[in-house]
Amino acid sequence: MAILGKLYNRFRQVIVKPEENGEPSSGYWPFKIRKQAVEMCKERKGELLEMGCGEGLFLERIAKLAPQLDILGIDSSNEILNKARRRIEGANLSNVKVRLGEAQNLPLDNDSFDTVVCLNMLYNLPSKEEVLETIKEMARVCKPEGRIIFDIRNKLNPETFLRFKLVKYYDPQCPWPLKAYRVKEISDALKKIGLEVTRKAPIGFPLSFIAPVVLIEARKRL
């Protein structure tokens, strides 16, 4: 199994963008997800929150492309947030700030943000219940008629299923087990918490039901 690890590390070196090299949030799918999320958010207005902002890779990109947004990034690790602060300061971005906070207990008021984003995080949570609690917290701080945007790794995609099953062999640093879900089960759960799916953006394959990753946008009902 050590061979799998070596191949995986070599693969990461090839696919990671130079500006993301060495960052915990780097990788092929994380990059694709951030790129699609930027496209979905760059025309938005008002206030945007990213939960689990990590080292600020999404924050930097969206702040540059959408100067009309007031942006806040929250993460539970102060060490990681310091990296985000340095990235933001280095890019001289005045429309983005970061602060410490837990995803399932945000230090923020109800109905505060026009857009709430959570990227490359939910598949690391240990259960579907915790995923839904996190989404509920996103909905709590989102304004009525606002949008929440998050990604799920698709359980019906063969590559995702196999990669998640074998992750402990090729990436022992990863906090496995990783969790994948069917798009329909998450969409159905959103309805029960007052969210209406407005868009499903498949990543890696054009059909949502079998794409490796699906970015979901949902509207908070009045």
Image (spheres, helix red, strand yellow):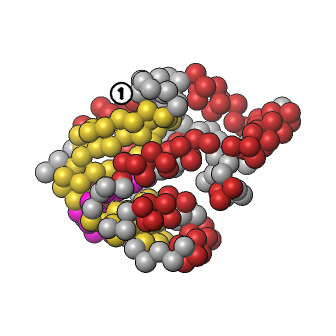
Queried whether the magenta region covers residue 26, the answer comes back as no
Magenta stretch bounds: 108-118
Q: Report which quarter residue 63 is drawn in.
A: bottom left
Q: Is residue 192 visible?
A: no
Please, what is the three-letter code of the amino acid marked with disc 1? Lys
Circle 1 sits on which residue? 184
Residue ID at (34%, 70%):
70
Residue for point 49% across, 27% down: 205
Vertical order, 59 against 188 (above or below): below
Tell me: 3 left or right of 182: right
Q: Tell how many labels.
A: 1
Q: Secondary structure at mark 1?
A: helix
Q: Does residue 43 appear in this view?
A: yes
Report the residue that reaches farthest toward the right.
2
Image location (x, y in percent) of residue 53: 50, 61
Q: Position of residue 5 (x, y in %)?
A: 80, 38
The location of residue 162, given as percent across then percent down, is 64, 25
Estimate how packed mark 1 is, as few (under 14), some (14 to 19) or many (20 or more) residues with alpha carbons within 10 Å: few
Q: Quadrant of residue 112?
A: bottom left
At x 36%, y 53%, the residue is 41
| Residue shown at 63% from the left, 33% from the top | 164
Which residue is at the front of the view, 43 or 172? 43
**In the displayed structure image, the side of residue 80 where residue 127 appears, left or right:** left
Q: Position of residue 160 (x, y in %)?
A: 58, 29
